[in-house]
Image: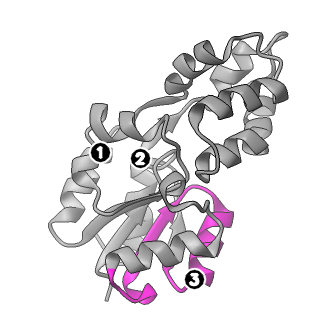
Amino acid sequence: MIEAILFDLGGVLVDVRDGEVLARLCEPPLDADVARQRWRASAAREALECGRIEPESFARRLLEEWPLGLEPARLLELAASWIGTPHAGAHALLRELRSRYRVGCLSNTSAIHWPRMRDAMGLGELLDPAVLSFEVGACKPDPAIFAHALARLGLPAGRVFFVDDVETHVRAARDAGLRAARADGPDGARRVLRAAGLL
């Protein structure tokens, strides 16, 4: 019996614009898909999201990786815009599920982006626990972040369902014993939850 459902944030509940924004900032501009792939491979991004460096160090390191032509302080000002808005239907889905399950998030994110999602987007009041890579010190697909989530929930892995838009993360969750499925956005999440008999 599933007792808790955990969601990834970016791509499932929230629109992510990192590739598009970085593509425009580059000198000369990059193709958005190329920028998105480069961002995912960024050592500075991984260090920030895994909690190994602070935002100020991240800005300096990213400027060493990317031809952005910005000062570190300006880069940090712009970084908040890499997270867009909640996907349509995200809040409604979370509220609906909270009447039957414990609902939280398990996400690779940073100290730059989480406060905006938590407060300005109102997701903090709907997600408990919020298992965040930069606080845990481990990023998906590291098994440590899934172990941390299960400890926070106090549940065996088989009673937790996880939704993510990255197949590698879904496989890692399954390897950790969770039930898991890949989905894009709240509509996709609804489809996989219905298929699993949870809606």
Residue 34 screen position, x and y as percent: 81, 32
Residue type (three-letter) at the residue carrying disc 1: Leu
Residue 69 vertical placement versus 147 (above, below): above
Residue corresponding to mark 2: 13
Residue 7 screen position, x and y as percent: 42, 60
Residue 195 vertical placement versus 103 (above, below): below
Dot 3 alpha-carbon crowd within 10 angstroms: few under 14, some 14 to 19, many 20 or more: some
Q: Is residue 103 visible?
A: yes
The quarter of the rendered structure image containing the C terminus is: bottom left
> Circle 1 — which element?
loop
Residue at 29 percent of width and 45 percent of height: 123
Q: In the rendered structure, does residue 161 fall within the stretch colored magenta? A: yes
> Is the Cβ of the residue at disc 2 closer than 8 Å to that at disc 1?
yes
Residue at 34 percent of width and 38 percent of height: 88
- Magenta segment: 154-179
Q: Is residue 196 visible?
A: no
Residue corresponding to mark 3: 176
Task: In the rendered structure, find residue 123 and report the number of the disc placed on it.
Answer: 1
Residue type (three-letter) at the residue carrying disc 3: Ala
- Report whether 28 appears left or right of 78: right
- Report whether 180 appears left or right of 116: right
Residue 44 screen position, x and y as percent: 73, 40
> Circle 2 — which element?
loop
